[in-house]
Image (cartoon, rainbow, N blue to C red):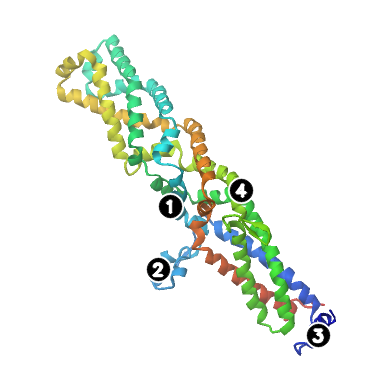
Amino acid sequence: MDAISQFFQDWASGDLTGGHGVDWFAFISIPFFTGIIGWLINWSGLWMLFSPVRFYGFKVPGLREVSTIIPRKLQEVPGIPYGRVGWQGIVPARAAKMGSIAVDKVIAKLGTPAEFYAQLEPEEIAAHIVKVFESDLPSMVEEIMMREHPRMWRDLPAPLKAGVVARVQAQLPNVVTTITDEIGVHINQLLDPKIMVIDHFRKNPELVVRVFRDVGQRELNLMVAFGFIFGFLLGVPVAIVDQTWHIWWLLPILGIFVGWTTNLLGMWLIFDPPEARRILGIKVQGLFLRRQAECAEVYAGIIADDVITLERIGDFLMDGPRGDRTRQMIATAMKPAIDQAAGPLRGAARIFVGADKFDNIRESFAREAVGRTITPFRDPEFSKRQSEKIKSLIARRTKELPPKDFVEMMRAAIKEDEWMLYAHGALMGAAGGFIHLGIFNWGWIPGFPP
């Protein structure tokens, strides 16, 4: 015990290293200083992750050409590949990439397009289509007949007109059911969740930011708070080294280590380890993973309300890369309706208006019906009701994901870019070291320290 006490006295007095003694004011200030820097590093690191949503910067002539020969890591900095200097949040800059990973690693495991469609209860969709369509049907028949054969339609007695409309309406439930069933049979070919999700995330990078913030806000706040704790704890050995050798450049160099490590520990705290482990008898697991069930509900709500919605499914089916196939399928299913509506008069009608004209009426009816058939998919109120079913499916499957797959949902898209956060931490740590030197050694503040 006496030997330890003597060693401490020799170190404090400077006899151990042949230098002057410990400046206790500077010694005590270092951990608090590194703690504040650690907090700032993690706070500003979060800003770098999420802000700004859109790129802000300016174009530099020739940078785009030079960017092809600079180190690969530097090519990943937002804006550089396009010859621009500025910044965009890492998460929104990688929105399309996150969409791709979300499908490959998570959404693809949650269910096939057919499972999603079945969860929406196609018979309920069919009933809603009929309900919406019925009120529009008389005006649609009137519009088509006046366009294709106005004279005949004007001369047709009102009871016969009403009979045509009534027969079409009578066929409508069966026709619509056939359409929704056909969509269900071919949904895996008509709907591509990967294209749908990637395109939506790319156009709406703020949604990707919302996914991170809403799902992991509690953990992100803890990461900032722990920045001070990690910085303070790491500052203790830094203070010992600094006051032992009194070499001016040690503090900035050690600041690089503190800044880098603070960010590294912050990310580790949230995401690692995925599986619960016991270290020295203490249960250790990434904070994000401990709330998998709760986070799954939040994530499912965002996906169901904004990404894989009935409205967006309808838009993709009609206007997506396979929209022509969807339209043709619906049109083919609708054509028999006009034949069945004509009933026993079909043959006479073909003779009276001509075979080509009658076929034109059928084609026109089918074309008009295509857009109106899919309209209920775009009904916000109906879509909202159906989204609860999608949310239930996604939440259930997400809770069942292995922790390793679950954590990939959040981290995989930014993992390759984490080095920017660590480099940012290192630069801030070095800057903190120079600021401490300026205040305590170089007299930047007159009369301080006293």
As measured in the structure, the alpha-carbon distance from the residue carrying label 4 to the one carrying label 3 is 50 Å
Query: At which x and y percent is residue 366?
Result: 28, 28
In this view, the mark in front (3 or 2): 3
In the depicted structure, whether residue 156 falls above or below residue 318: above
Q: CA distance from mark 3 to mark 2?
A: 59 Å
Q: Select label 3 or label 1 by which is in front.
A: 3
Q: Which residue of the protein is positioned furthest toward the bottom in this rendering?
A: 18
Residue 109, given in percent of the width and then of the height, sits at 45, 46
Q: Disc 1 designates what residue?
A: 100
Please report the residue visible at 73 percent of the width from the left and 70 percent of the height from the top.
Answer: 31
Q: Tell me, for residue 64, which label it has, or none.
A: 2
| Residue 423, position as x, y percentages in the image | 56, 69
Q: Tag 2: residue type?
A: Arg
- Residue 274 at x, y = what percent? 56, 55
Q: Which element type, helix, strand or loop, lies under badge 2?
A: helix
Query: Three-letter amino acid code at disc 4?
Result: Arg
Sequence-wise, which precedes: disc 3 or disc 2? 3
Of circles 4 and 2, which is in front? 4
Residues at discs 4 and 2 in contact (Cβ within 8 Å):
no
Looking at the rendered structure, the kind of residue marked 3 is Asp
Q: Which mark is residue 291?
A: 4
Looking at numbered disc 1 in the image, what kind of residue is underneath it?
Answer: Ser
* Tag of residue 10: 3
Q: Quadrant of residue 316?
A: top left
Instruction: Classify mark 1: helix, strand or loop.
Output: helix
Give the class, few, some or many, for how many residues have Cα within 10 Å of label 1's Cα (few <14, many ≥20).
many
* Placement of 74 over or under 272, stated as above or below: below
